[in-house]
Image (spheres, rainbow, N blue to C red):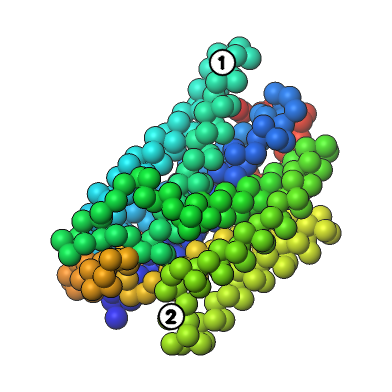
């Protein structure tokens, strides 16, 4: 029972991370398409500025839960996906540095360097996270010793790339909606139009990913065994439909929340589909890293559950305050920090 609770918590934490960090990864990716001058680029930075580092707390939390609750899964994941995860870490570092360094020197060339770093440091994590999770959903080539037989290029298989493209599109629309909510004037119009243009492409890729998952993975096995689980699809399907409705009526915050439901629902769909495995093996199901053969001791899981019950609500409360305080529309006339 404890293993299942921690598995669900693990999945929820990843979903929260994708929802919260997804919008600034997407926004950083499309900044060159939206901003026409330095003032608009600064507005985009400030639309992300108060939130991006707090959003990444959820990445650390999800990784920490993997390490503490399922140490064997953590070991296999971080050894087998070492190159991809190092690229992810480097890209996130570059992105973080770009926020801090951009305005240290009053030079267009200097700012252009860090703007480029922001774009790269936003696009690569979105793509790599999608590729990584798609491969987890499909199954990694894990052998009897728990060693992943493959490299970075083996992760770049067709299914993995479709997952990566899907994540990029989900995050790009999410970021465009966030900017539409937080900006005014022409920038708001362009970001809203960007979200509207990305929406049909996202839908096509999302449907294609689901069909591909049915043909190439075992994600639907749990759903056919327990048809009630199909109710989970209400979250992403409802999010897709409502986001388009709210985009057409220019209710940007509502559209962003609907987009968040799509991202969370898509993530949870895949995670529920692989249960009870954390890292399914494509070589032999018996070699899979599951919640049972990789979990910490019962006492450890009990103690950590108490810790999580205290601190996760505190983190949620703090972030709720941050979003409530700093989520006002940004005017070109106000002082911009970045």
**In the figure, is residue 97 to the left or right of 253?**
left
Quarter of the image for residue 279 reads: bottom left
Q: Which residue was labeled with disc 2?
A: 221
| Left or right: 77, with 265 as reference point | left
Left or right: 76, with 90 as reference point: left
* Residue 69: image location, x then y, percent: 26, 64
Residue 251 is at least partly visible in this image = no
Q: Dividing the image into 4 quarters, which one contains the C terminus?
A: top right
Q: Secondary structure at mark 2?
A: helix
Image quadrant holding the N terminus, namely bottom left
Q: Is residue 273 above or below residue 104?
A: below
Q: Residue at x 67, y 61 (%)?
A: 203
Tell me where residue 188 appears, x and y as whole percent: 78, 42
Residue 75 position, x and y percent, is 23, 54
Whether 237 is drawn above or below 152: the answer is below
| Mark 1 burial class by Cα count in 10 Å: few <14, some 14-19, many 20+ | some
Taking the spot 50% from the left edge, 68% from the top edge, the residue there is: 213
Q: Residue at x 56, y 15 (%)?
A: 110
Where, by quadrant of the figure, is residue 108 drawn? top right
| Cα–Cα span, label 2 and label 1 | 52 Å
Q: Identify the residue at image location x=39%, y=38%.
A: 87
Residue ID for mark 1: 110
């Amino acid at each position: 029972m404890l293993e299942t609770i921690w598995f669900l918590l693990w999945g929820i934490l990843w979903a929260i991370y994708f929802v919260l960090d997804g919008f600034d990864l997407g926004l950083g990716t499309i900044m060159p398409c939206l901003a026409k001058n330095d003032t608009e680029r600064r507005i985009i930075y400030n639309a992300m500025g108060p939130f991006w580092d707090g959003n990444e707390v959820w990445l650390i939390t999800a990784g920490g839960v993997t390490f503490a609750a399922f140490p064997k899964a953590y070991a296999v994941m971080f050894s087998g996906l070492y190159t991809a995860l190092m690229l992810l870490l480097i890209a996130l570092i570059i992105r973080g540095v770009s926020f801090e360094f951009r305005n240290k020197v009053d030079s267009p060339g200097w700012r252009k360097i860090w703007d480029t770093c922001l774009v790269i440091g936003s696009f690569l994590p979105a793509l790599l996270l999608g590729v990584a999770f798609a491969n987890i959903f499909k199954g990694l080539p894990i052998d009897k010793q728990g060693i992943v037989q493959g490299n970075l290029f083996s992760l770049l298989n067709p299914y993995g790339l479709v997952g990566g493209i899907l994540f990029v599109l989900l995050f790009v629309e999410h970021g465009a909606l966030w900017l539409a909510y937080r900006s005014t004037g022409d920038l708001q119009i362009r970001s809203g139009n960007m979200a509207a243009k990305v929406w049909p492409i996202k839908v096509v890729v999302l449907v294609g990913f689901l069909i591909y998952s049915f043909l190439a993975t075992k994600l639907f096995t749990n759903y056919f065994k327990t048809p009630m689980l199909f109710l989970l699809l209400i979250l992403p399907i409802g999010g897709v439909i409502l986001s388009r409705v709210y985009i057409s009526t220019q209710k940007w915050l509502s559209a962003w929340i609907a987009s968040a439901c799509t991202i969370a629902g898509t993530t949870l769909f895949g995670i529920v589909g692989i249960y009870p495995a954390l890292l399914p093996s494509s070589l032999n199901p018996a070699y899979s890293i599951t919640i049972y053969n990789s979990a910490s001791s019962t006492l450890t899981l009990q103690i950590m559950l108490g810790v999580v019950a205290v601190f996760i609500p505190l983190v949620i409360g703090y972030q709720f305050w941050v979003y409530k305080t700093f989520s006002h529309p940004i005017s070109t006339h106000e002082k911009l920090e970045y």
